[in-house]
C-alpha cells in the first residue's frame, strides 16, 4: 500500500479497533468512472481519463461528503485515519502516490485534527505502459466522521478511457488545479531548524497575506509516530514570519531528518507545498 511520496506506511490496527462502526461495500464499474461506494457520511468513487501519450492517467479519488461530515488529510491528527488507496499492479497500472488539496484545521476543544468538511477530490498519480484504455482495479480505506468516525473501505474497478461526462472531466481538472503550488520567491520557507531536545520546529517564511499580522496557516506531516502541535507566531514583518511549532516523537524515540517533514502552507488566497530542509 502506497501513500504520499513524503510519508511512509501508517499502521491503523489500533485506530480501527477503537472505532464503533465499519462499512465495506464492493462496487461494480462503468465507463471512465466507478460506481459510488456509499456510506453513512458520504460516497466515494474514482474518475479517470484516457491515458496520455506518456502513459500518465489523469484520475481522482472523488469524495462526496454529506453535510456535517468530514474526512481527513495526509496527517489527520490524534484520532483520524489518513486516506489510503491500493492499485492492483496486475492490470499494468502503476500507482506512485496520492496528492491533497490544502486542508483545514478543526478543533473541538478536546482534539485538533486536519481534513476537509466539504466534497473533496484527491488526485492519483497513475501510469500505464499500455497505449489504449487501461483497466483500473483499486481498493481504498479512509475515515468519514461526524459524532463518530466510520472507516469506509471499498473495491473499485473500471476502464480508463475518455471521460463521457464533461462534468467528470472538469472535476479531474479542478482537482489538479486545486493542489498547492511549488515554492516561489513570494511564498517559500526561508529557513527551517529543529531543536530535538526541546521538541520544537522553527520556520522562517515569506508568504503573501492581507496583513503583516496574519501568519500563514501551515500543515505538517512527518514520519509515523511524530505529531505536530499548534503553530505559534514569534515575529512578523513585511510578509516575513517566524513561527514555532511543538512536536511529539514516538515513544520508541528517533530524530527527524532533513526532508522527513512535508509542509503545506496557505496565505493570501494561495497555497504552497514543500519538504523541509533543515539548517
Image (spheres, helix red, strand yellow):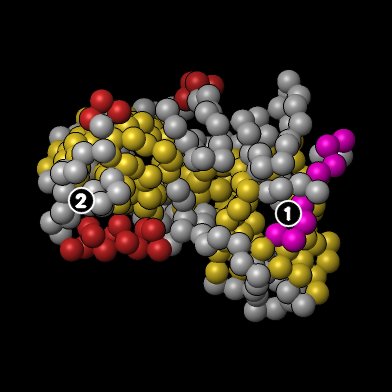
Residue 232 seen in render: no
The residue at 55%/60% (across/down) is: 182
The residue at 36%/28% (across/down) is: 22
Q: Secondary structure at mark 1?
A: loop
| Residue labelled with disc 2 | 50
Q: Nearer the viewer, mark 1 or mark 2?
A: 2
As measured in the structure, the alpha-carbon distance from the residue carrying label 1 to the one carrying label 2 is 42 Å
Residue 141 in the image: state x and y as whole percent.
38, 33
State the predominant SS element of the stretch in magenta.
strand
Res 236 → quadrant: bottom right
Sequence-first tag of 1 and 2: 2
Which of 244 and 97 lies nearest the eye of the viewer? 97
Quadrant including the N terminus: top left
Residue 132 in the image: state x and y as whole percent.
15, 44
Residue 217 in the image: state x and y as whole percent.
64, 61
Residue 30 in the image: state x and y as whole percent.
12, 43
In the image, residue 105 sits, relative to residue 133, either above or below, namely below
Residue 217 seen in render: yes
Q: Quick check: is 190 in the magenta stretch? A: yes
Left or right of residue 84, residue 208 in this image: right
Q: Which residues are magenta?
A: 189-197
| Residue, far right | 197
| Residue labelled with disc 1 | 231
Amino acid at each position: 500500500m502506497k501513500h504520499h511520496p513524503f510519508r511512509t506506511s501508517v499502521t491503523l490496527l489500533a485506530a480501527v479497533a477503537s472505532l464503533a462502526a465499519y462499512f465495506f461495500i464492493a462496487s461494480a464499474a462503468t465507463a471512465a468512472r466507478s460506481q459510488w461506494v456509499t456510506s453513512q457520511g458520504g460516497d466515494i468513487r474514482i474518475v479517470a481519463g484516457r491515458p496520455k501519450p506518456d502513459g500518465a492517467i489523469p484520475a481522482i479519488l472523488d469524495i462526496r461528503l454529506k453535510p456535517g461530515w468530514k474526512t481527513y488529510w495526509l496527517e489527520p491528527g490524534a484520532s483520524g485515519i489518513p486516506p489510503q488507496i491500493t492499485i492492483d499492479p496486475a492490470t499494468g497500472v502503476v500507482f506512485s502516490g496520492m496528492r491533497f488539496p490544502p486542508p483545514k484545521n478543526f478543533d473541538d476543544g478536546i482534539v485538533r485534527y486536519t481534513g476537509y468538511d466539504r466534497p473533496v477530490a484527491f488526485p492519483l498519480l497513475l501510469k500505464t505502459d499500455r497505449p489504449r484504455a487501461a483497466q483500473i482495479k483499486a481498493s481504498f480505506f479512509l475515515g468519514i466522521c461526524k459524532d463518530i468516525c466510520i472507516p469506509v473501505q471499498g473495491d473499485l474497478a473500471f476502464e480508463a478511457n475518455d471521460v463521457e461526462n464533461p462534468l467528470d472531466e472538469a472535476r479531474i481538472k479542478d482537482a489538479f488545479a486545486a493542489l498547492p503550488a511549488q515554492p516561489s520567491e513570494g511564498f517559500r520557507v526561508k529557513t527551517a531548524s529543529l531543536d530535538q531536545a526541546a521538541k520544537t520546529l522553527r520556520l522562517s517564511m515569506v508568504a503573501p497575506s492581507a496583513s503583516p499580522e496574519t501568519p500563514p496557516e501551515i500543515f505538517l506531516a512527518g514520519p509515523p509516530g511524530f505529531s505536530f502541535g499548534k503553530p505559534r507566531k514569534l515575529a512578523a514583518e513585511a510578509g516575513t514570519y517566524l513561527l514555532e511549532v511543538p512536536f511529539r516523537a514516538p515513544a520508541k524515540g528517533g530524530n527527524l531528518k532533513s526532508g522527513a517533514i512535508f509542509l503545506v502552507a496557505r496565505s493570501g488566497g494561495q497555497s504552497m507545498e514543500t519538504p523541509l530542509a533543515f539548517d
